Image: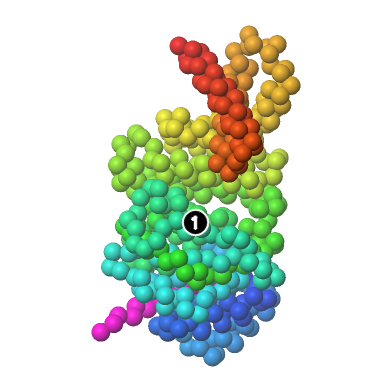
Amino acid sequence: MKYFPKVSIIVPVYNVEKYLSECMKSACNQTYTNIEIICVDDGSTDGSSAILRKYAEEDARIIIIKQENAGLSAARNTALSYATGEWIAMLDSDDYFDVQAIEKAISCCDIDVDVIQFGVRMFDENGDKIAPGLEMKFEGKQAVTEKLITSIYAGVWDKLWKKSFLDRCGVLFPVGLHMEDLAFSRCCLSLAKNVYFLRDKLYSYRYREDSIMGKHKNKQGGRRIFDYVKIAEFCLDFWKERNIRERFGYSAETPSFLEIELITNIKNCIHWWGAREYQHEAWACICELVDHYKLGSRLPEFLDLAFYYHLPPYVRPMIHEMIKMNRLREQENSELKRNLLLLANEDYILKRNRQFSLLSKLVWGEKRRKYKEKKKYYHDLLTRCRQIRKEAEI
């Protein structure tokens, strides 16, 4: 006899009347019927509550929970406490599922699988596809490794989560912070045994300019950008409590790749999405994280993060500009400026060398020879920088 486990679909709702009907219709019309749909009305002030009541009257599988506005994390945490399914799906109220999403995803469930990840279609408010969407690097059942965890998109809505696994993890969404998906996913996945990857695009994600993601992308997140630092603290504290270093084969004193990658990811998000006036303060916060959690011993293995740690954001463009203008040549006796020059020069050359390596693979004929010459030039400069650095250390 075939087994049909119950699936709880969690839908947090706050002032999304424009999109809610499409979302609810996609949940109610699933070809897989053994579901419950838990909608948490997080203090909506528009017509969202009326839309939920309408659908609940037509479908007994819908459970509506009303609460005062407390944010997306609190709404999801509330829904998790009510969920009775053996698997959990999370559907944002401005997105929607493919009609066969749950059926296809649940067909991949296995006793040793803790998480099932499926493909995502991304589109804008006009319904136009946003290419290329989220790339899936794996397929089928995969054992969890550090590399796998850091290669998976940190969203929670492109996955089915085994409820018993989530209960063992004991992870809830951090309340009051943006980008809570990153904390929840990274912490849970670090304790998972196996993940199943299904390439079918079963989830449709709507990108909105007025959404949290839209505001960050347009550098309008303000001081909310520091939520990334708090998310990093959340994960690092969790991993310390769960001895994540030992789990992945490190000694207690050796930072894991997972910790370093998290800091690098946070650094990149702040650099890409944070307004310029907050960059230096954010840099100081990240340096403090590296020092507090004793991650510095592995920085030499991760050049981008090492350069960021040693060179504040306001120094980098200034140093690079000075290099271009050759203004540092008159200050060769200054040890500080000499070291900054080495760091900045090496960083600059490494990045250019990577670019020319890629271009040399793509360009043929005379242009290819041209780029090969430039690549050799940067390679020679990089070698010289490393020689001078070695001499200075001696």
Q: Which residue lies furthest to the bottom in this view?
A: 58
- Residue at left 51%, top 41%? 264
Pinpoint residue 318: horizontal percent, then vertical percent: 70, 27
Region in magenta: 1-11
- Residue at left 63%, top 57%? 213
Pinpoint residue 188: horizontal percent, then vertical percent: 40, 57
Give the position of the N terminus as an image quadrant.
bottom left
Give the position of the C terminus as an image quadrant.
top left
Q: Is residue 139 above or below residue 228?
A: below
Q: Residue furthest left?
A: 1
Q: In this view, does 222 lie above or below 385?
A: below
- Residue at left 62%, top 29%? 374
Pinpoint residue 370: horizontal percent, then vertical percent: 63, 32
Q: Can residue 54 be seen in this view?
A: yes
Could you say which is closer to the camera, residue 298 or residue 239? 298
In the displayed structure, does residue 199 sit left or right of residue 323? Answer: left
Could you say which is closer to the camera, residue 104 or residue 243? 104
Q: Which residue is label 1 attached to?
A: 153
Q: Is 174 one of the magenta-colored residues?
A: no
Q: Which residue lies furthest to the front in this view?
A: 365
Residue type pointed to by label 1: Tyr
Q: In this view, does 313 lie above or below 340?
A: below
Local packing at callout 1 (Cα closer than 10 Å; few below 14, some 14-19, many 20+) is some
Q: Can residue 285 be seen in this view?
A: no
Could you say which is closer to the camera, residue 119 or residue 183? 119
Could you say which is closer to the camera, residue 149 or residue 71? 149
